[in-house]
DNA sequence: CTGCATCCGATCAGATACTG
DNA sequence: CAGTATCTGATCGGATGCAG
């Protein structure tokens, strides 16, 4: 796609780099940008996990949002959903290879956050104090 | 990813990894998760840029959202806003060191998108076809 | 040129209640 | 246990008009 070209290469033809709905970055952003998605992927880094276990680790998430997020990630091929025919029901969620490839990004995100959050907080305080 | 502080009503929850509003990752996610923010940061990778230039490169963004995004990023210390006292007005936006440190993540995001978008699209098609 | 103010529809997400 | 269904307030974001 056009928007995949970097800014430096875009001078000749395509000056508009983002905002195209078909842009891969846009699609990924819709997923990475989703708070719950990132949390789910990050939580599943440790291995397969049940629904309730996920709900516990991601405190604050409602059943509705958790289910919605899991379904979307499943549809995107980032995780698998395995239903065991037992009573009580047991459903396991596990990252696919594709999902695990995202972990690098998620980790990078976390690392940046931990490293720079103080700077951001200070900048905000300084801005608000003007 | 452990958030050191936890919600007041869930003191004993040690396994809760995300979801705390004070969690650094949450704050960063609020920024990275914002579609326009990522586009602005990515666009400014090439150097300082004027308001209109940004609007053109990020096609589809409304003045309202562009301004809102720029203000937020400025407040977070990710970019600087320089007003030149000329007529007509000229305002330059430029990434700070902090902002440039985010470029690594943005690039990683774009790279992942370009690399795996086909797999995601196929997974979606397969899911929808069931 | 670089915005800000306002209106308004669309979507998101939390709370709550209920079920196989 | 693992969800589904519904209601509702909050937020997002586009369109429009105007100003310094």
Image: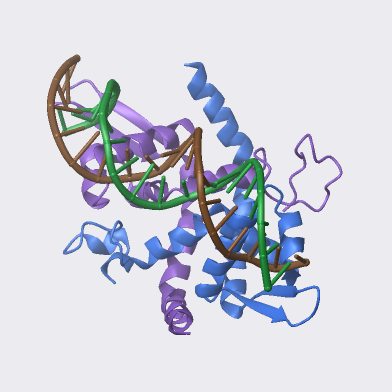
Chain colours: A blue, B purple, C green, D brown
- In x, y percent, where is residue A47? 74, 72
- The count of marks equals 0
Relative to A51, is B9 above or below?
A: above
Q: Is residue A126 left or right of residue B67?
A: right
Viewer-side residue, A94 vs A130 = A94
For the question of whether residue B79 can be seen, the reply is yes
- In x, y percent, where is residue A96? 61, 78
Q: In the image as oriented, which residue stretches furthest toward the right?
A: B12
- In x, y percent, where is residue B40? 36, 47
Relative to B38, is C15 above or below?
A: above
Relative to B15, is A76 above or below?
A: below
- In x, y percent, where is residue D16? 14, 34
Q: Is residue A29 left or right of residue A77?
A: left
Residue at image position (46%, 56%) is: B106
For the question of whether residue A115 can be seen, the reply is no
Residue at image position (53%, 76%) is: A77
Q: Is residue B98 left or right of residue B53?
A: right
**The quadrant where residue A70 appears:** bottom right
**The quadrant where residue B94 appears:** top left
Q: Is residue B125 left or right of residue A101?
A: left
**The quadrant where residue B92 appears:** top left
Relative to B3, is A49 above or below?
A: below
Residue at image position (75%, 55%) is: A57
In the rendered view of the protein, which quadrant contains the N terminus of chain A? bottom left
Viewer-side residue, D5 vs A31 = D5
Residue at image position (49%, 54%) is: A33
């Amino acid at each position: 796609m056009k928007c995949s070209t970097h800014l430096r290469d875009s001078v000749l033809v395509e000056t508009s780099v983002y905002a195209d709905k078909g842009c891969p970055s846009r699609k990924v952003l819709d997923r990475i940008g989703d708070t719950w998605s990132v949390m789910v992927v990050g939580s599943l880094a440790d291995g397969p996990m049940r629904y309730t276990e996920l709900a516990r680790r991601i405190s604050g998430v409602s059943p509705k949002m958790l289910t919605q997020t899991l379904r979307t990630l499943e549809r995107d091929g980032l995780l698998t959903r395995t239903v065991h025919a037992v009573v009580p029901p047991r459903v396991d969620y596990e990252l696919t290879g594709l999902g695990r490839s995202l972990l690098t990004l998620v980790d990078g995100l976390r690392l940046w956050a931990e490293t720079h959050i103080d700077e951001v907080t200070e900048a905000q305080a300084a801005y608000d104090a003007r």
